[in-house]
Every structure is written in structure tokens, then in C-alpha cells.
């Protein structure tokens, strides 16, 4: 298949391509005219991961944002959730459903920034501005409310712990005062003082971590309470995470890295490469821990569709659950390491006198209670400031002032539609062509049958004459290019095998109405015009037509010779063509195949061979009847007529297979009704070379 093949397809199916292009373009043009103008308004929001409130809460070092997705992307998912839209519709009182608002709402990240571009597209410009601004305000308010609620719940928890710690501090101070009064000892001396200061430092770190653990545990419990309702399986997954050995190992390694960062922070400046490298390694490991926790708890990057289907509250609590669990594991591992160091120092107190030891224990107990009270008191003050400040992570930095009409140039739209229609039309043309089983070109017939083409016969217009008989172009127009094609066919049928002498010919076709009788009549005329004594035998005993081609009566014929013992001379009729006779069928026999098998028919053929130079047998279509298979075994050459307007590929294959099974001498095929460029070129060349010369000779 080459480009000419596809070009031929498109030329044949041009009306499909034009119709498809016209319909698609017209539909797009009409739809564009009726399409209402849409107006788009845009607002801008700023996301701040570490704002004032988060720094007060201590989240910058204890709970980092999730690492498996962009926090700004999470905020975009939260903005475009149904609860926010429902609140906007309620506040504005507009006649739009939440689904209609959601269909026109879009949010995206301004590249390389933490700015969120919030857009709304609607029919009314004033509504677009109101809706996009109100959505931004509602989301900012809800973000602030969330952070305020978190700070308030944390403050309540710290106040409870502060009251308990205050009682413990009072008890520790009373015990220390009583011991001093009874033993007249007011300070720790010697090694006890050194060990005591070291243990106090460790206890201070443990107390601070314990406070952090209690705060994080409170956030974890809060998230669990809410998620137990919407996601009951989260508790079992949380227990699985706590029992996971890999998670425990990673948490221990993370605690070691935290200690290493703390040590290097005391040894190096803030911009020292050693400190930066340690912090980078810690952050990398923290990301690994959180991703592992997210995998077990069911929040992986591949579940973004599930995340977008959650409400904003569910999304926040799920993030809070994972962050809190990771932080608790890291704090527990770090506390375990400190407790091991603490045990080492406690073992050294064995060599210290008993009273100094008791005094040291009471002092450390009092200092620990006082440190705990100080930490809780400071945290409570921070929570009060956070509630008063009431800042969230998102701010509306630019409201929409006006909307912009979304207008696509009509010419561009129609042009693109025409292009799509053209492509669609080309596809339809190819589909129809491939579904059409008809043979369109001689090359197709040759590829399918693998037989030589003995003749290419052009399309003939006005197939019937004024008298009503079938038009024979070799009689009515002997100087036409079509007649010349028949003469060429006459020549090539005898050159199939130059060593053989061809006297009898049979023409058949795969199906009915494919022109094999007309081809046979014209071929016989050209044979007679060559001076050969020629006979046409109409052996199509089912639908005879040769008597119509030559305007002869069909009263006496083969039937009479075979069954009625009619003399052959009385059955054969002369035609208007010199040297050409015709033997019609006569009455149609009840069993045509039996007639062809009759001994009288065989003797008739043998006698005709002695009297004529060329005999042409017309037979029924091979795919419909077995007549051609029976008759073909008695002739010298069989020609298969293929009509490029009606013959199918499957039909030709079936015809060839039947003829081969009958072992008939199939010489080749005749392709008729050609309308290709080659035929038109042949016609023009013939007219220029032959007709023009005849005119020139007549003028002379």
C-alpha cells in the first residue's frame, strides 16, 4: 500500500470527508453562537507553613509537614470541597446549587511559589467576583477556626497538667524543707553536687520531652476520637504501626539523629557545614519515617483521590494522626536514650554518703517539679497568645475586583472544528473502505487471486441501444479505446502459453450481473473480425442472454440438439457479424448440469471443434452453480471476469478455489469497468494517436 492507494480511497470517498468537515464545522459554529459568554474572576491566597501560631505551638521542630505531597496541593483540595461551597451559597443567597458552583471553581499553585490562584467562572460577572472572594474568606475563616480550636484544646490540657504539677511541686518543696530542718543540711557538696547538676540537666530534658509527649498524645487522642467515627479501621492500623519493627528501628535512628543535631548545635555555629549536614540527614530520615507511617495508616501518594473525597476536617485529623504518631515514636526513642545515660549517673551515687544521697534526691525531685511547672506555665501562656492572635496558615492577599470574559475567537474555534471534522472524515473514509469488500483496483484483484490479468476493460456508458438490445461496443464503436481493449484481450488470451493452440474458451464470473456475457460477446466479435470462423455457445442454461445481444430468437438450441435430436445445422444461427455464429439454449432444460454431462452434448462439442476456429462458451456464475466447473473441463482456457464495481474479494477467492478444485484450465482474469487514472490516460493517448491520424488521412 502506497500513498496513491490512500489517495484513491480519499478521492472515492470525498463526499464523506466533505460532509464530515461541513457537519462538524457547522455544528461548532452554531453552538459557538449560542454559547453564553462566561466570566472568570481570580483571587490570590498565600499559604504559610510556619506562621506565628505554628512557631508558638512548637511545631517547627516537633511536627513537620507531611513529606509525600506538597502542602499547598493539600490546601487546594481543601478549598474546593463541598462544605466550603455550601457555606458560600448559604451566605450569598445565590440561585446556584453547590454542584454548579463546584463545576466552575478551580484552584492551582502559582509556579515556584506558595501562592494559590483561586478562580471561578460563571455566567454573571458580578456573581463570579462575589463567589471567588467569598470562597477565599470562608476558607481563611475555617483555617483560623481550626487553629484556634487546636490551641484552645491544647490550652485546656496544659491547664489540667499545670494544676497537677503545682501540687507535685508543693509536695516536693515540703519534703525538702522538712529534711533540711531535721538534718540541718541545706546544700549538696562534693561529687554529689557534680552528679546532681548532670542528672538535673538530664531530668530537665526528660521533663521537656515528657511535656511534648503529653501535648502530642493529646493531639493524637483527639484525632483518634474523630477518625473512629469516619474510619473505624484506623485504630487497628495504628496498633499495627506501633508494633511494626521497621517503624521502631527508624524511630530509634531518628532519635539518635536528633541527639546528634543537638550535640553539633552546641559545638558549631548555626551556618556550619557540619550542623547543616546533620540537620539535612535528620530531615531526610524524618521523611522516611513519616512515609512509612503513612503507608501503614493508609495515606500514600497514590490515594489522592481518597484524600480529595474526604472533608477538610477528616483530612486535617488524618495528617494530625500521622504527625503525632511519628513524633511520639521519636520522643520515646530519645527519652529511652536519655534514661540510659541517667542510669549511668545514678549508679555513681553509691559512693556518696546516705544523707547526701537523700538530700540530692529531694533536691532533684524539687527541681524537676519546678522545671515541669515552668514548662507547662510557659506553654499555657503561648496557647493564650495563639488564641488571641488567631492566625491560620492561609491568608487572602488579593481579592477579585472584576471578572474577565472568557471568549475564544470564533474563527479559531471553527477552524479547529473543521480540522477535527476533516480528520474524522478521513477516518470514516478509511473505515468504510476497509469494511467494503469490493475490489477497486486491478492490483487488488491480482493480489487476491494471484492470477495474471489478461485484459483491462474500461467503463462503458449507455449499455443499451435504441432498439433495446445490449450494446456491443465492438460493433457500435469499432474505433473506440474500449474496442481496442477487447482486441488486446483477444491477443493475450492466446499468448498465455505460446506452445499451445487455444480453440475453445469459457467465461464465468464469481457472481451474477458482473458482465461476463457482454465480455464474451465482444470478445467473439473481435475474434470474427480477425477472420476466424467463430461460434458463441450460450451454455448459461439457467438465464440465457446471448440471443438478446445479437437480436436472435431463442426457439431452437442446445436443448433441441441434446434431447430432441435436432440437426446441429438447424440449431446454429448466423449473426450480423461476418464469420460469427451463435448457438442459443433453446428451451431451458429441467436439469442444466445433467445436460452438460450428456453424451450428446459432448459429441456436439467435438463436432463444433471440427467446424470452427474459435468457440466461446457462456456459463453461469461459478459461485452459484456447478455448471462452470463441469463445462470448464471440456475447454482449452477459462477466463474469470472481475467487475471492480461489484465483485468482492471473498467472492473472487471462492471462485478461484472452486475452479481449482474442478481442475479447469484457469488462464487468468479479465478486469472490467475500469475508471482509474490509467484508463483515462489510455483513452486520451488512443484518441491522440489513432483517431487524430484517421482524421488527418481523411483530410488528405
Image: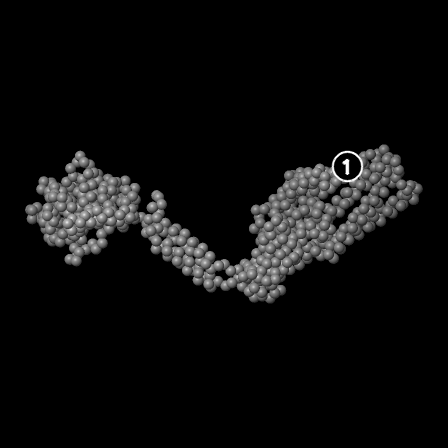
**In the image as oriented, which residue stretches furthest toward the right?**
184
Q: Total of numbered circles in the picture?
A: 1
The answer to whether 528 appears left or right of 186 in the picture is: left
Q: Residue at x 16, y 46 (%)?
A: 526
Give the quadrant of residue 194: top right
The answer, for residue 390, to whether it is visible in the render is yes
**In the image as oriented, which residue stretches furthest toward the front?**
700
> Quick one: label 1, few (<14), some, or many (20+) residues within 10 Å?
few
| Rendered location of residue 379, percent (x, y) | 76, 51
Q: Residue at x 41, y 57 (%)?
A: 24
| Rendered location of residue 147, percent (x, y) | 69, 54
Of 292 and 285, the residue lying toward us: 285
Of 543 and 61, the residue lying toward us: 61
- Residue labelled with disc 1: 341
| Residue 263 versus residue 85 in the image, above or below | above
Of 200 and 20, the residue lying toward us: 20
Amino acid at each position: 500500500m502506497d500513498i496513491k492507494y490512500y489517495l484513491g480511497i480519499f478521492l472515492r470517498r470525498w463526499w464523506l470527508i466533505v460532509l464530515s468537515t461541513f457537519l462538524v464545522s457547522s455544528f461548532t459554529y452554531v453552538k459557538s453562537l449560542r454559547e453564553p459568554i462566561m466570566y472568570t474572576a481570580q483571587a490570590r491566597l498565600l499559604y504559610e507553613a510556619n506562621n506565628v501560631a505554628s512557631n508558638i505551638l512548637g511545631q517547627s521542630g516537633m511536627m513537620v509537614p507531611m513529606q509525600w505531597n506538597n502542602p499547598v496541593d493539600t490546601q487546594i483540595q481543601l478549598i474546593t470541597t463541598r462544605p466550603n461551597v455550601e457555606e458560600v451559597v448559604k451566605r450569598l443567597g445565590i440561585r446556584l446549587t453547590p454542584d454548579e458552583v463546584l463545576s466552575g471553581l478551580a484552584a492551582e499553585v502559582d509556579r515556584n511559589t506558595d501562592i494559590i490562584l483561586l478562580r471561578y467562572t460563571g455566567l454573571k460577572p458580578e456573581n463570579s467576583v462575589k463567589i471567588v472572594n467569598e470562597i477565599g474568606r470562608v476558607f481563611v475563616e475555617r483555617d483560623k477556626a481550626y487553629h484556634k480550636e487546636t490551641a484552645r484544646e491544647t490550652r485546656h490540657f496544659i491547664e489540667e497538667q499545670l494544676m497537677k504539677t503545682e501540687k507535685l511541686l508543693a509536695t516536693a518543696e515540703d519534703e525538702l524543707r522538712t529534711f533540711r530542718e531535721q538534718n540541718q543540711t541545706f546544700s549538696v557538696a562534693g561529687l554529689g553536687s557534680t552528679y546532681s547538676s548532670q542528672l538535673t540537666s538530664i531530668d530537665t530534658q526528660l521533663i521537656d520531652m515528657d511535656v511534648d509527649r503529653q501535648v502530642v498524645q493529646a493531639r493524637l487522642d483527639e484525632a483518634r476520637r474523630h477518625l473512629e467515627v469516619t474510619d473505624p479501621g484506623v485504630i487497628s492500623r495504628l496498633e499495627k504501626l506501633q508494633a511494626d519493627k521497621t517503624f521502631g528501628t527508624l524511630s530509634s535512628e531518628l532519635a539518635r539523629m536528633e541527639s546528634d543535631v543537638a550535640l553539633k548545635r552546641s559545638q558549631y555555629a548555626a551556618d556550619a557545614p557540619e550542623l547543616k549536614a546533620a540537620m539535612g540527614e535528620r530531615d531526610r530520615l524524618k521523611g522516611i519515617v513519616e512515609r512509612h507511617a503513612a503507608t501503614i495508616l493508609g495515606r500514600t501518594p497514590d490515594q489522592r483521590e481518597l484524600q480529595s473525597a474526604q472533608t477538610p476536617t477528616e483530612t486535617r485529623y488524618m495528617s494530625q494522626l500521622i504527625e503525632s504518631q511519628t513524633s511520639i515514636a521519636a520522643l520515646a526513642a530519645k527519652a529511652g536514650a536519655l534514661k540510659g545515660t541517667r542510669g549511668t549517673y545514678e549508679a555513681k551515687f553509691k559512693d556518696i554518703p546516705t544523707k547526701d544521697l537523700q538530700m540530692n534526691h529531694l533536691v532533684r525531685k524539687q527541681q524537676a517539679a519546678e522545671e515541669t511547672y515552668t514548662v507547662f506555665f510557659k506553654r499555657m501562656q503561648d496557647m493564650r497568645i495563639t488564641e488571641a492572635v488567631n492566625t491560620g496558615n492561609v491568608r487572602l492577599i488579593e481579592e477579585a475586583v472584576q471578572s474577565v470574559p472568557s471568549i475564544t475567537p470564533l474563527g479559531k474555534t471553527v477552524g479547529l472544528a473543521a480540522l477535527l471534522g476533516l480528520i474524522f472524515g478521513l477516518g470514516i473514509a478509511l473505515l468504510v473502505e476497509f469494511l467494503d469488500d469490493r475490489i477497486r483496483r486491478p492490483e487488488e484483484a491480482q493480489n487476491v487471486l494471484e492470477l495474471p490479468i489478461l485484459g483491462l476493460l474500461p467503463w462503458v456508458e449507455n449499455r443499451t441501444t435504441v432498439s433495446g438490445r445490449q450494446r456491443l461496443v465492438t460493433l457500435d464503436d469499432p474505433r473506440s479505446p474500449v474496442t481496442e481493449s477487447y482486441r488486446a484481450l483477444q491477443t493475450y488470451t492466446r499468448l498465455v502459453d505460446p506452445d499451445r493452440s487455444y480453440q475453445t474458451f469459457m467465461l464465468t464470473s464469481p457472481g451474477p450481473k458482473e458482465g461476463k456475457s457482454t465480455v464474451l460477446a465482444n470478445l467473439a466479435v473481435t475474434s470474427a473480425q480477425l477472420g476466424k470462423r467463430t461460434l458463441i455457445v450460450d451454455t448459461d442454461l439457467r438465464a440465457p442472454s446471448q440471443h438478446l445481444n445479437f437480436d436472435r430468437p431463442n426457439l431452437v438450441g442446445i436443448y433441441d440438439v441434446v434431447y430432441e435430436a435436432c440437426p446441429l445445422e438447424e440449431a446454429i444461427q448466423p449473426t450480423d457479424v461476418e464469420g460469427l455464429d451463435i448457438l442459443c439454449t433453446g428451451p431451458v432444460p429441467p436439469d442444466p448440469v445433467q445436460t452438460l454431462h450428456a453424451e450428446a452434448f459432448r459429441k456436439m462439442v467435438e463436432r463444433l471443434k471440427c467446424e470452427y476456429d474459435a468457440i466461446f462458451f457462456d456459463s453461469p456464475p461459478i459461485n452459484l452453480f456447478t455448471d462452470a466447473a463441469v463445462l470448464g473441463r471440456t475447454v482449452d482456457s477459462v477466463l474469470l471476469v472481475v467487475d471492480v464495481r461489484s465483485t468482492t474479494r471473498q467472492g473472487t477467492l471462492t471462485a478461484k478455489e472452486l475452479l481449482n478444485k474442478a481442475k479447469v484450465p484457469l488462464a487468468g482474469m479479465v478486469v472490467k469497468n475500469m475508471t482509474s487514472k490509467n484508463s483515462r490516460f489510455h483513452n486520451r493517448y488512443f484518441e491522440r494517436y489513432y483517431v487524430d491520424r484517421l482524421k488527418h488521412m481523411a483530410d488528405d
